[in-house]
Amino acid sequence: MFLKIQSLLFITLLAVTSLVSAQEWQQQRVDASSNPDAWIKKTSELIEKYDDQRQFEELAMAYALQVEAYRYSGHESKVHAAIDEGLRFAELADSKIAKTLLRINQTWYFLQRGQLRQANTSIIYAIENAKASGNKDLQIEADILHAQVMQNTGDIARALQTLEQLNRNAYTAHPRLQVEFHALIGSIYLDVGANDIGLEHIQDALDISREHLGQWDVSVLEYNLATGYQAAGNDEKARQHFETALEISKAINDDLGVAYALFQMASIDIENESYQQGLERLNRAMPQFKSAGAHPMEAQSRLAMVSAYLGTNELENALAELEDASSVINTLADDQLYQTLNERWSEYYQSRENYKAALEHYKTSVSYMQKVREQTQDKQVQEIMVRLEIKEQETTNELLKKENQLQQLELQEQQTSYYLLVWIIISGLLVVIIVSAFLYQQWRARKNFAELALKDDLTNAPNRRAIVRICKKGLEQAREQQRQLALAVVDFDYFKAINDQFGHDVGDRVLQRFAEVAKLSLRDQDNFGRLGGEEWLLVFFDVSKEDAKNIFERITQEMNSKPISGLPEDYRITFSMGFTNAHPEDSFDSLYKRADDVLFEAKDKGRERLIITD
């Protein structure tokens, strides 16, 4: 799976004149996303104007906007020069914001080319300047991009930790930052095999983008959602979203975006043995990748061509593409590409009936797969790992069989053939053992990440996403089985006073106690989760109003049955609860609002009480 490594964030820019408001610039960034060619022309005029007036800070900012417009239109070849010029004037003006914006663009430029070391250096500069600027949203943007670099270098654990820390401590209502957060965390979950969660995040990003951002942003999210469906094995939905991304990219003259969509559609064609159609799309995409210097995508396209030519038995064309792909990949530090390259060489030599060379390249492919596993820690080893999981034993046995047949024809001495066969079998068994161990570790990693996404860090209880999902599924089940579902919203009384008087650590222990008590007090068919702060959600099946009163009293009693460290022994913890039964026509939002309304009624009537409504 290859998500576009183009920035979804259109960076905060200074106004063309001091009279332009922040809201107007917000709209201008959206306009630039939908019409990059017009903004290339406009920024060229601004650069000429500010250069004549020697206004260095405004000049640096104009270059930053021009870089974004170039990238939106796929003119990657012009990005580097504009970045260098912008940085020169940003240094003269000592503009921390301009430096940050240009370094962020420089990071995306390097990621596009697979230059990961340079990308990491550039984002460090961006983070330093963002902190010095004092702009909170700009700091968040740089941190999210840093997580993107971590993902590309295989450090998935740190990338996810960075995003979760931002989600806890640096919330922003800025639509573009929310889009970037959901898009990246969705990509990470897709990488580790948690497809449902990954698709959910990317869909959230796409919904925000459609409402608040421009056409380029929407095309990127359509593309990324399509790659998610492709990874999940839903080629039909993947093709629909790729076609949407393709049409938007054509409409805004984003030639590189067109190439990305064509490449992924070609990969679906080749997988379905529509080799000629796949080759036609790849031949249209290749010039754009070469022109933009997108070397990883050029290499991927050539490897896809190899698969198509092998499928049509055009071995000379396959050999030519393999040699060109080798030249490109040798300039990149990408073990995943080396792994795929050796796999294609193995398939080529099998077609030539050179089974000895096929086996050697197959073994090299497995060794690179091992390197990828070590470098990427818990990252899923994408297509090759899936292939090995299904067919590794079959492929190894077939290659060993053909190699043995070839050796029998070439070697005359029985003893020599016997020793060679033993060596091949031992090598094959070692490959089976290594790959089996990798698959087991990968299964554990996917399971751990999927669980992490649905747990609250502090209390280890289900988080907002988990309990809302449980409630929505419960509503469907209640309608299908004609059962009664009820919802309760719980909020602690005077919780802020606990934090202010005794400290946030004590408040955290109160929340942890509630999770323990709720787990013990509720029935097996009931569920609970933390919505956020001190607010909790309880979901019940087939519960009466009397049961609700008993649960309220039981939890209250257990909360105060023993002291909590940091609180006086006689301190009494109370909470209010709003309880309501679901109606057949209820959605989660309508059900939650009804329970939340009576919760506020309980607060107004003096707190420490349960109010029930139908």
Image: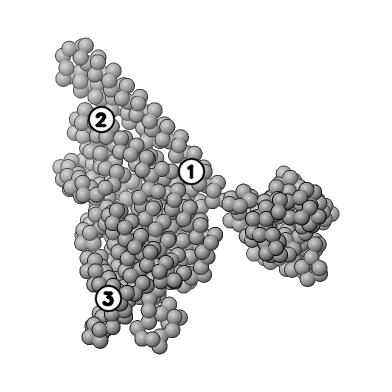
Q: Residues within 10 Å of mark 3 (few under 14, many from 20)?
A: few
Residue 183 figure quarter: bottom left
Question: Gap between marks 1 and 3, in whole Å?
Answer: 49 Å
Q: Which mark, residue 446?
A: 1
**Do the CB atoms of the residues marked 3 and 2 lie less than 8 Å apart?**
no
Indicate the quadrant where residue 107 lies.
bottom left
- The single residue placed furthest to the bottom in the displayed view is 19
Specify the amino acid type for callout 2.
Leu
Across and down, in percent, residue 82 comes to 24, 71
Residue that appears at 77% across and 68% down: 603
Q: Which numbered tag is attached to residue 359?
A: 2
The residue singled out by tag 3 in the image is 92
Question: Which numbered disc, 1 or 2, marks the residue that appears first in the sequence?
Answer: 2
Of callouts 3 and 2, the N-terminal one: 3
Q: Nearer the viewer, residue 105 or 325?
A: 105
* Residue 592 vertical position relative to residue 399 in the rendered view, above or below: below
| Nearer to us: label 1 or label 3 | 3
Residue located 28% across and 47% down the image: 334
- Distance, label 3 to label 2, CA atoms, is 59 Å
> Which type of secondary structure does the marked residue at label 2 adopt?
helix
Inspect the image, locate mark 3, and give the three-letter code of the amino acid beneath it: Leu
Sequence-first tag of 1 and 3? 3
88 to 368, vertically: above or below? below
* Badge 1 element: helix
